[in-house]
Image (cartoon, rainbow, N blue to C red):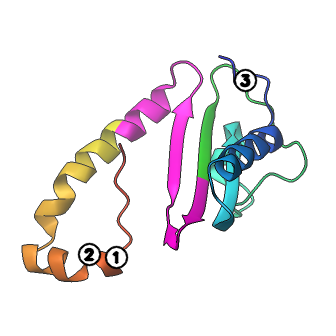
Amino acid sequence: MAFCSRTEGRAQQWMAGYLRDHGVKTWLHKPIAAFAERTLAPDAEWGPARGDGLTLRAGDVAILDCSPIVDGYTGDVAYTVSVGANAELSKAQTFLSELRDLLPEQLPIQQRLDDLSQRRIIIAP
């Protein structure tokens, strides 16, 4: 729980610093940290916290998202985690895992091969 008591703003700075230290010079979008109710984008906006933002606490859900560009390649990585058990997040992760298993069956193989580079497919780990 070393991340508890960290603010969204500090988490964003930490992610950006780590990525810069490992060669990232530019971004599709800068690191975003959303904690607790901000993970639902209640203001219909998804973006970096302004100022400190919320403070991470036990039981919260957190989204850490970044999209660095390295050597001309863009990555878009997001992790959704909880600090301790969270029944709603567990239910969502189970649903997404089942959906991920079904997606390949829904696309014809030739379409997958021809259009894969044109689609934005997110596969959760």
Amino acid type, mark 3:
Arg
Percent position of residue 108, x then y = 9, 74
Q: Residues within 10 Å of mark 2 (few under 14, many from 20)?
A: few
> In the visual, does 92 lie left or right of 109?
right
For numbered disc 3, what is the local secondary structure?
Answer: loop
Amino acid type, mark 1:
Arg
Residue drawn at (62%, 22%) of the image: 59
Question: Which residue is identified by label 2?
Answer: 116
Amino acid type, mark 2:
Leu
| Quarter of the figure that contains the C terminus | top left
Percent position of residue 86, x then y = 51, 25
Question: Which residue is identified by label 1?
Answer: 119
Residue drawn at (68%, 36%) of the image: 36
Residue 9 among magenta residues: no
Q: How far apart are marks 1 and 2 (CA)?
A: 5 Å
Q: How far apart are marks 2 and 3 (CA)?
A: 39 Å
> In the visual, does 77 lie left or right of 110?
right
Pair 1/3: label in front: 1
Question: Which residue is identified by label 3?
Answer: 57
The boundaries of the magenta stretch are: 66-93
Say the numbered circle drawn on residue 53.
none
Front residue of 85/28: it is 28
